[in-house]
Amino acid sequence: MGKKLVIVESPHKATTISKYLGKDFEVVSSKGHVRDLSTKGKYGFGVDIENHFKPDYIPIKGKKKLIDELKKEVKDSDFVYLASDPDREGEAIAWHLYDSLGLSANKYDRIVFNEITKNAVLESLKHARKIDQDLVNSQEARRILDRIIGFRLSKLIQSKTDGSSAGRVQSVALKLVVDREREIEAFQAEEYWTITSKFEEFEADLCWYDHKEIEIPNEEKADQILSELSNQFKIESIEQKTKNKPSKVPFITSTLQQEASSKLGMTSKKTMSIAQKLYEGIELENETVGLISYMRTDSIRLSDEFVKETTGYIKNEFGENYVGRVKQGKKKENVQDAHEAIRPTSIHRDPLSMKPYLTNDEYKLYRLIYYRALASLMADAKTNNTTIVLDNQNYQFKTTGQIITFDGYLKVYHEYEDTKDHLLPTLEQGKELEAETIEKEQHFTKPPARYSEAKLIKEMEELGIGRPSTYATTMETLKTRGYVNVIEKRFIPTEIGFEITDKLQEYFSHLINIEYTALMEADLDKIADGKIIWYHTLQEFYDQFEPSVKHAFDAMPKKIAEQTGEDCPECGHPLVIRKGKYGSFTACSNFPECKYIKADPKSIVEITKCPNCDGMIIEKKTKRGKLFYGCNNYPTCKTAYWDLPTGKKCPECGNMIVEKNKKMKCSSCDYTE
């Protein structure tokens, strides 16, 4: 063959791959998707519902010129390799290129690689195949499904409420946030007490009376128990157990987003953006190479080559006894096991040697991915756990201790796990001890915690809602649509978020729920496996959905904005009170033709300069009227605090010092003045 054309998705990836292939290859980029559904036909779906949901595709705005340029490249080439990403979205992009460029079946092949390294790219050419139409059908069904739901529900929501959009996955995710907030509002704290005996070298908590679990509901009960106790304790039992502490499996998309959030403070959007760069290629001293494998995956599988390379590395660096085993994990339904877990492309590119070529955030994320994959193949840590039970007047107190006897995988992963020795003194069974003090303490049960971005993604994954490629987008949609506020990294539904959820549940509870959304994901997976026909699934859905939408348009009352009695100074229409992300505001009723908003300077209390942009931190209120402090450049800047910002930086982590209960503390770390 003469000239061979390789089409990838991103320009950066094209630059990297072009360095691996010889002069007979030319590598170009489609810059992502080249076509999408039109807005023709019924309700602007771009779909012929009566003809098996046949889609009508058109070039994405600004892509027609690119398609014409790619056609010229194809014409000048003897063979074309479609090398878009190794997932359903990538398969669909390959099909759109095949169709829009007019490729013939004998003039193209589809190649996929899980990592962008020279060996992986060259190996993919040996395993070229044709486009997998089942994968394309699955992605097409998802796109049409989301278009139908998004267009119809968004139109309904815009005409009847203060909201702007609704969607198959985003609305269920929002419902989780709203339901959690209502749990918190309905929660009633219950009082309970604990009793602790304090000795010179350790403490022990009261757990049982006559070896039966004991509850202390009030101070009266606590005082009664204290009156029955003496300061003399007898060691009733000492139990020692050796336990194995295994490392976690390597990262998949959801766990990477969760750990990057909790350990590095990164949003899912930022995490995926950085991971994309690490995957597509980093310029090193003598080569350009992808540092990690493909980052959109729900499989924990590792390639045999990586396992072999890493096992040898562990043996050489740490010794034979540090070599572990390949973890299988629990088999989950709907896992796309053709992919691998997220891992470094070579264990020999350790984070420290890569640091000069990476930004600070890229280094932090690469380091986390590298050591998670390395640790997953290392031996279990071993701990010696001691449990001591002490008796005092037939009341049993318990204390526990732990010593790490073999660090195993913690040799490399100790920074990311809170595992420390908790030493107990050497004691003998039957020996008597005298407590220095025995103290009571009052507590109250706490409501369930609000979702952080990481916890919401974890919940969605466990419930089967969405897929690896959708988590970050869903999080951003909830924030940018104004359905949630993010305060101290926790999601709090806005008034609009409550309103949208309630309206959707009133009219669409049979479709907008966890079970139905998870079942639809399962059906999309069956389409990908060729087990069911894609347009049959869409027809079954549409036959339920459309009558519900028509009923909602007829039955759902339109929200009428309250007039203020004033006229707009710009167009003369009445001013009305509207609901926003942070409560009510006065605006023109002629929106969107007129975008006048009445300023209310008295309501704005400026606190200090925003540490993350050129804005100001001002006083704001949640839907329930609770005071918090946020940047006036929201949503461009999402900086927010529950406690009063002081304008001072934490000397340990550089984040804002806040005032809470007349004490100065860091808003992010444990630093306290």
Image: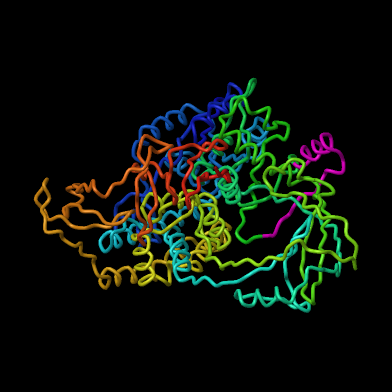
Question: Is 501 in front, or is 388?
Answer: 388
Residue 93, horizontal then vertical, whole percent: 48, 43
- In the displayed structure, 332 sits above or below 135; it is below
What range of the chain is rendered magenta? 307-331
Identify the residue at horizontal 85%, vertical 67% (top origin).
Answer: 235
Snapshot quadrant of residue 281? top right
Q: Is residue 92 left or right of residue 163?
A: right
> In the rendered image, is residue 371 in sight?
yes
Residue 451, horizontal then vertical, whole percent: 51, 57
Question: Is 220 in front, or is 649?
Answer: 220
Question: Is 22 in front, or is 152?
Answer: 152
Question: Is 607 in front, or is 305?
Answer: 607
Tell me, yes or no, whether the highlighted magenta stretch contains residue 318.
yes
Identify the residue at horizontal 37%, vertical 57% (top origin).
Answer: 622
Identify the residue at horizontal 72%, vertical 43% (top origin).
Answer: 413
> In the rendered image, is residue 83 in sight?
no
Residue 312, horizontal then vertical, whole percent: 82, 37
Residue 54, horizontal then vertical, whole percent: 39, 56
- In the displayed structure, 133 sits above or below 102; it is below
